[in-house]
Amino acid sequence: MPIFGGKENSVFNAIDRHMEVVKATLEKFREMMVVYLDKDFEKARELEMQVDRLESEADTLRREIETMLYEGAFLPASRGDYVRLSEEIDQVADAAESAAHTLILARPKVPIEIKDEIIMLVDAALETYKTLMEGVKNLNVDVNKALEYAKKTEDAEERADELEYDAKRKAFESETISTYAKLIWNQILTKIGDIADRAEDASDQVMLMAIKRRG
C-alpha cells in the first residue's frame, strides 16, 4: 500500500516518468555504441542526437519535479531529499550524454579486441540503473525493499567497475590499438563507468531516505 497521498503521489508519478526517460536515454546510448562498434558512424551520429534529445527531456522532467516539490508536496524537511534524488537520477542521463559526445567527437578507431567488453560494460551500467529504479519505486511502497535494492545497486556498480577495469587493461595491453585510440577509449570507458557510478550515488540517497522513513 502506498504510504503517501495526493500531492506526494503526484511527485512519485513524475519521478517514475523521469526515470523512464533516463532509462530510454541509456538504451539509446547502448544502441549508439553497438552501431558505432559496427562502424556505421553516420547512424551513430544520428543516435547521438537522439541521446541528446532524451537527456534534454529528462532535464525538463527534473525541473517539473522540483517545481512540484516547492509548491508544497511533502513536509519541508523532506523536500530537499527528493530534490537531491531527482538530481542524482538526472546525472545518470548526463553521464550517458557525456560518453556519447566524447565518442562521436573523437571518433576513435573501433577496437576489435574489446568490442564485447565494451558492450558488457554498457549492459552492466544499464543494469545498475535498472536496479536503482526498483529501489526508488519502493520508497513509496516498502522501505525495506527500497533498502534491499539500494544495496543491490551498489553490488551492480561494483560489477561494472570490474568490467571497466578489465576492458581498460585489455585495451592498454593491445599491440594493435594505437596510442591515441587507447587514450580516447580510456576516457569513454571511464564515462560509461560513470553511468553506473551516478546510479550508485542515487542509491545512496535512496538508502538515506529509506532509513529516515523507517525511523
Image (cartoon, grey):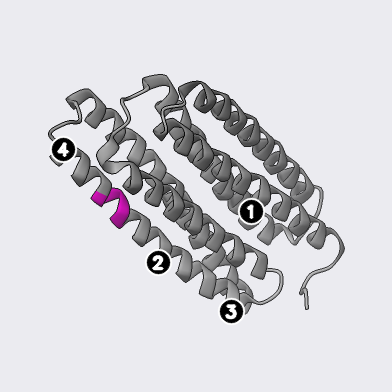
Q: Nearer the viewer, residue 183 or 10?
A: 183
Which stretch appears magenta? 162-166
Question: From this viewpoint, is residue 53 visible?
Answer: yes
Name the residue rendered at 69%, 36% in the picture.
57
**Label 1 belongs to which residue?**
80
Which of the two marks, 3 or 4, is nearer to us in this view? 4
Note whether 211 is above or below 60 in the view shown.
below
- Disc 4 element: loop
Q: Position of residue 143 (x, y in %)?
A: 62, 75
Q: Main secondary structure of the magenta part?
A: helix
Question: First in sequence: mark 3 or mark 2?
Answer: 3
**Label 2 belongs to which residue?**
155
Q: Distance between the Cα atoms at labels 2 and 4?
A: 29 Å
Q: Position of residue 69 (x, y in %)?
A: 75, 51
- Disc 2 element: helix
Question: First in sequence: mark 3 or mark 4?
Answer: 3
Name the residue rendered at 50%, 42% in the picture.
30
What residue type is disc 3 on?
Answer: Asn
Q: Residues within 10 Å of mark 2 (few under 14, many from 20)?
A: some
Which of the two marks, 1 or 2, is nearer to us in this view? 2
**Label 3 belongs to which residue?**
144
Question: First in sequence: mark 2 or mark 4?
Answer: 2
Tell me the quarter of the picture where residue 36 sits. top left
Q: Which mark is residue 174?
A: 4
Name the residue rendered at 63%, 74% in the picture.
213
- Disc 3 element: helix
Q: Distance between the Cα atoms at labels 3 and 1?
A: 21 Å
Which of the two marks, 2 or 4, is nearer to us in this view? 4
Q: Is residue 57 left or right of residue 191?
A: right
Q: Distance between the Cα atoms at labels 1 and 2?
A: 26 Å
Q: Distance between the Cα atoms at labels 3 and 4?
A: 46 Å
Q: Distance between the Cα atoms at labels 3 and 2?
A: 17 Å
